[in-house]
Amino acid sequence: MLRYSLKRLLSLGLSLLAASAVIFLTIEIVPGDPASYMLGINAQADTVAALREELGLNVSAFERYISWVGGMLTGDFGTSYTYRTPVVDMIGDRIMISLPLAIYALSLSTLIAFPAGILAASKRGSVTDVSIMGATQVGVAIPNFWFAMLLVVVFSINLRWFSAGGFPGWDKGLIVGLKALTLPAISLALPQASILARVMRSALIDTMNEDFVRTARAKGLSKRQAMWRHALRNAMIPVLTIIGLQFSFLIAGAIIIENVFFLPGLGRLVFQSISQRDLIVVESVVMLLVFAVVIVTFIVDLTYAAVDPRLRGRS
Amino acid sequence: MKFLQIENLNLSIYGMGILKNVSLSAEKGEIIGVIGESGSGKSMMAFSVMDLLPTGTERSGRIALDGQDLLTKTEAQMCAIRGNDIGMIFQEPMTALNPVKTIGDQVAETVLIHGNASRNKASQIARDTLNRVGLPAEQFPLSRYPHELSGGQRQRVVIAMAIALQPKLLIADEPTTALDVTTQAQILDLLKKLVAEDGMCLMLITHDLGVVAELADHIVIMKTGEVVEAGETHALFRNMQHPYTKALFEASSHVPDKGDARAAEPAPLLEVRDAIRDYVLPRKTVFGKQGSFRAVNKVSFTLTKGENLGLVGESGCGKSTLTRAILGLEELQGGEIRINNTTVQAGTHMPRELRRKMQVVFQDPYGSFNPRHKVARLVAEPFHLLEVELNGAERRKAVEEALIEVGMQPLDADKYIHEFSGGQRQRIAIARALIIKPDLIILDEAVSALDVSIRAQILDLLADLSSRLNLSYLFISHDLSVVRSVTDRVMVMKSGEIVEYGVTEAVFTNPQHAYTKTLIAAAPSLHDALEKEND
């Protein structure tokens, strides 16, 4: 198990290094000089040159890459070209919204999907199964921004249970914060839960047809016991894969929902920074997202090994 | 009233009759053998006793265990009976165990689920039972996972789960079909010992007459859902009444007519000289030295034109690797393989005319065809090896000729593969091999998945083709009786080496190497079992 973890950890480090190089190169290729952009089209050449020097843009690309990576390792993400504030502070504020939102949405999605998938699988072919599968079909089909607007119309405008958008800040209390994130989390969770429930159902049905479930039944386990004790854990591998992918998506991909609910999250930050040529922010946020994805993959890999002894290697 | 009494059992799935008036009975301490070919309903009969049938099935009649009618039990009552009063062992040990639970947990579960003991006591019982089935604590602690065990060891774990509570009836459904002969002999010995120790009744379901003849007290022969003949084992074999029993008996020891002695033409077709195949193993540590595994170790032999050469060995002995090397699918690390004096080179270097000279027929008649193509296209597949591909009428004619050659109809070319039975599919596979008129056909366990009566037909077909077309076969099998009946010479392979090589009859009647002796002794033989009885 330890060797397996170390191996995964090594591949994690290499992935991050490769990703940082790719991100840096991509941003280098993108046309547009941040200094000229910031000073406008009528700027004097020597003013631009002075700003370039101040921003550290006049050294070679390789030197900038090294100082960027070195800075990140020591917690210094540089200074935003546009706002002249440390990038790390900007990201810090935003991540306090994006990360809780992703965790909230994923928890909701899992809480809905597991019981729904298990119930559908155990009552395969029944009215319950058909209804659950029908509902998930709709859940996958509905665009989540449209569903988000629907939620706003019903729960904010008509019922007035939730505010229609914005975020009051965590200093107003945990409950207030969570309440503001509830509608966005639900709209993010709906399609995710639908997909997850379908994966859970089909994985469980497949596993229930395995020979070892028949062996368990021959020992005297009821169908229900065989499912809970033997099939469920074996069905977890595809489910964990999907959860991992979904979490990565939720951190970075909530941009539309953030816009619908006016949430100052990471998605909106990237969007704004790109339109303002604030490349250093873009680089850092993208790197952070890659980091999140790689970490999630690492955790999923470790969970695989916890679930399936065959992956732990000979110890 | 006997201990196990099945009377007029009928079974249907969605209205289609599967079992018709099946009756049989057995006492405690007895072994009853149930024999039949695939589709005879023998497994369905076993699952009827367990009440583990697929949905849509209906049973009628009576299944009495110790005087209690099982057909009247509720599902909850059956759960209490399964594992406690009736244990069951399955055919496929590789998939019969839960891969994510330890063997200790899985054996102990039988005890725990019936509430017979505390967790500690259940572990103790699991340990004792594993010891009984030949998995001692030093090598097989309870914390082992199934993937760390071999097929035979896994089957022992399955047996341990089934007998942990010392059930009165043990049902074994083809328990050794997936195992090598020597492992099969050990498992059968184990079952015999357990039956004697616990006074269990064992229902042994198999297609192999040799297995039951040595073990069973009584035999029931089933065909298409009915019992066609039943009785005390040796009396039944001495005095067979039903034509099906006779046919089954004949087929299982079938020797195909090899035809006239072939023209004495000792021209070598396939020459293998000191062939070596090493596999590289994954590194143990990041900077450690890479190990290697020698799958084929200095193998040499010659196959002459028109000769049938057998290759026998247990799983993992390297026979598949050797076959792949001959086909040019594996690179050699040493030695040479020549066909018609041209050297076989692996991968893309292999010339087409060399590939044309050999074709292969695989074991699984179900998995070796693309289900979306018609037979005409499947059979014509090797045509891409021709310099100028045949087209149109010529192509069609060649396909039809090949089909007729193997006893199929020309119109079969327009059907899909799922419309054929296993035996017919294997004929089509042979037609596919024949179509470009190769010199050598490699038969890789080509009849292993077939029922005895079908197997006999395919063996006849192969013998007929060999004598008419002067074909050579490399016949790879774990089934010694088949190899004995069809080959001229035989090689015995063990751990990558040929340990014995000679004229087939001589090797079988007077084996020289210890391993060959073990193999022959372990193979269940109907003939020997009956002879032993007569002595």
Image: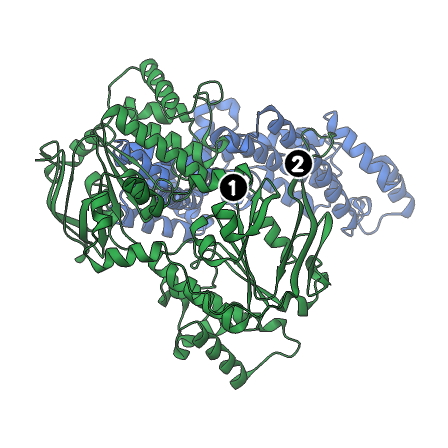
Chain colours: A blue, B green
**Which residue carries the number 1 mark?**
B516
**Which residue carries the number 2 mark?**
B282
Q: Residue furthest right?
A: A46
- The subunit carrying tag 1 is B
* Sequence-first tag of 2 and 1: 2
Q: Is residue A167 visible?
A: no
Residue A216 image position (x, y, % from top left) = 31, 34
Identify which residue, B458 or A113, lies in the foreground: B458
Q: Is residue A248 visible?
A: yes
Residue A113 image position (x, y, % from top left) = 38, 39
Q: Look at the numbered discs 2 and 1 and tell me whether their residues touch, using CB distance below 8 Å.
A: no
- The subunit carrying tag 2 is B
Identify which residue, A20 or A81, lies in the foreground: A20
Regarding mark 1 in the picture, which secondary structure is present there?
helix
The image quadrant of residue A190 is top left
In the rendered structure, which amino acid carries the disc numbered 2? Answer: Pro
Q: Give the alpha-carbon distance from disc 2 to disc 1, as whole Å.
A: 33 Å
The image quadrant of residue B162 is top left
| Residue under the image location 49 percent in, 42 percent down | A242
| Residue under the image location 34 percent in, 27 percent down | B160
Identify which residue, B65 or B370, lies in the foreground: B65
> Would residue B21 be found to the left or right of residue B207 on screen?
left
Mark 1 neighbour density, 10 Å: few (under 14) some (14–19) many (20 or more): many
Identify which residue, A40 or B56, lies in the foreground: B56
In the rendered structure, which amino acid carries the disc numbered 1? Answer: Thr
Whether B270 is drawn above or below B125: the answer is below
Residue B399 image position (x, y, % from top left) = 49, 77
The image quadrant of residue B385 is bottom right
